[in-house]
């Protein structure tokens, strides 16, 4: 071992890797618990590339299929991080909305507002058919 780093550095790296693995397992367990009791279609995750990779490696295929993730630079500050989170959310919301309309343009999830392709807005509530009502 060289004088610089040596055993202490290796021990630190192992400890850090173990802590990251433990953290990733806690996140995956929490997500699995939430997804087992709620109907969750998408999971949005942001964080460092290393952290996201550790979480991703510990997920089941079922959870992994729901994940939309974005590696971000956590040193950029809260304002930049929050903007990245909002941007990812908006991108996913748009993608999900378009997928829904392509599959079934006349059936709408209960309790939402939206616009049909013609630009006319509809309001829909929690009725038995969830059909759109012109507003």
Image (tube, helix red, strand yellow):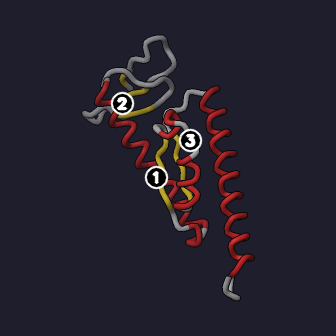
Q: Is residue 36 left or right of residue 86?
A: right
Q: Is residue 129 above or below residue 108?
A: above
Q: Alpha-carbon distance for marks 3 and 1?
A: 21 Å
Q: Is residue 19 above or below residue 10?
A: above
Disc 1 is placed on an element classified as helix
Q: Residues within 10 Å of mark 2 (few under 14, many from 20)?
A: some
Residue 38: x and y in percent read 61, 27
Query: Which mark identifies residue 100?
Result: 2
- Circles 2 and 1: CB atoms closer than 8 Å: no
Q: Is residue 83 left or right of residue 35?
A: left
According to the image, label 3 marks what residue? 59
Residue at x 69%, y 45% (from the top left corner): 26
According to the image, label 1 marks what residue? 88
Q: Earlier in the sequence, mark 3 or mark 2?
A: 3
Q: Alpha-carbon distance for marks 3 and 2?
A: 26 Å
Q: Residues within 10 Å of mark 3 (few under 14, many from 20)?
A: some
Among all residues in the image, which is located at the extreme top?
Answer: 128
Mark 3 vs mark 2, foreground winner is: 3
Residue 119: x and y in percent read 29, 36
């Amino acid at each position: 071992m060289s004088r610089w780093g040596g055993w202490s550095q290796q021990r630190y790296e192992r400890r850090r890797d173990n802590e990251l693995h433990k953290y990733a397992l806690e996140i995956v367990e929490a997500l699995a618990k939430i997804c087992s009791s709620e109907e969750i279609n998408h999971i949005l995750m942001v964080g460092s590339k290393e952290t996201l990779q550790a979480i991703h490696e510990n997920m089941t295929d079922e959870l992994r299929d729901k994940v939309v993730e974005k590696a971000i630079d956590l040193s950029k500050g809260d304002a930049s991080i929050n903007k990245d989170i909002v941007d990812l959310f908006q991108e996913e919301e748009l993608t999900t909305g378009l997928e829904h309309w392509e599959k079934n343009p006349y059936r709408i999830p209960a309790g939402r507002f939206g616009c049909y392709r013609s630009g006319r807005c509809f309001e829909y509530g929690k009725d038995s058919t969830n059909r759109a009502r012109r507003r």
